[in-house]
Image: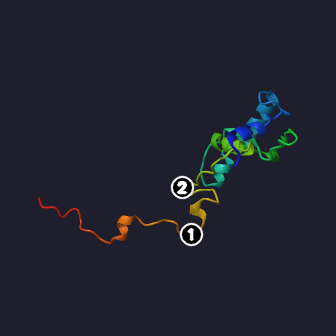
Amino acid sequence: MQSQRQASETYKPKRRTLPLHSAAWARLRAEVLAEEPLCRHCKERGMVTPATEVDHIEDSRADYSDDNSRENLQSLCKSCHSIKTSASMGKATSAGCDARGLPLDPDHHWNSGKATAKKSPATKKGPTACPSQFYW
């Protein structure tokens, strides 16, 4: 895993074919969000979250070109877009949870298939006297 300093040293800002503040990008962005109003990543996890960002599915940092075809664009919420962008920059990220609260990371110990929960030392001793047996 790279440190944040190493990741920031290897990251180079993109030169966009459509500048983010151009009218052409604003039209394309509005079209994508109108066609796909919910975050694609959240929807895959069973959650309903409004999309606010338009993301390039295939990030082309190697040659610094953008594929602005509709097939390469997806709608994401701010959180999912930030996680995806950070991961593509080489930073450590967390995948989060699905709608049931289960971790999405396949390497998370809950997803190992083994029961890793340990009993509390208090439960190993067996039943104890009920605390409601006080004399009044």
Residue 37 in sight from this viewpoint: no
What residue does disc 1 label?
114
Amino acid beneath label 2: Gly
Q: Position of residue 104 (x, y in %)?
A: 62, 56
* Relative horizontal placement of residue 87, taking residue 134 as reference (left or right): right
In the displayed orientation, state which residue is furthest to the bottom.
Answer: 126
Quarter holding residue 7:
top right
Task: State whether residue 99 is above or below residue 76.
Answer: below
* Relative horizontal placement of residue 101, taking residue 77 as reference (left or right): left
Q: Position of residue 118 (x, y in %)?
A: 46, 66
Quarter holding residue 84:
top right
Looking at this view, is 91 or 2 the one in front?
2
For the point 60% across and 63% down, the residue is 111
Q: Mark 2 vs mark 1: which is more N-terminal? A: 2
Measured in 3D between alpha carbons, the distance from the residue under mark 2 to the one under mark 1, in whole angstroms, is: 18 Å
Quarter holding residue 3:
top right
Mark 1 element type: loop
Q: Position of residue 26 (x, y in %)?
A: 76, 31
The count of marks equals 2
Looking at this view, is 27 or 92 the one in front?
92
* Relative horizontal placement of residue 45, taking residue 136 as reference (left or right): right
In this rendering, the label closer to the viewer, 2 or 1: 1
Amino acid beneath label 1: Lys
For the point 73% across and 37% down, the residue is 8
Task: State whether residue 65 is above or below residue 58.
Answer: above
Q: Residues within 10 Å of mark 2 (few under 14, many from 20)?
A: few
Residue 5 in sight from this viewpoint: yes
Looking at this view, is 3 or 71 the one in front?
3
What residue does disc 2 label?
101
Q: Residues within 10 Å of mark 1 (few under 14, many from 20)?
A: few
In which quadrant will I find the C terminus? bottom left
Q: Position of residue 10 (x, y in %)?
A: 78, 39
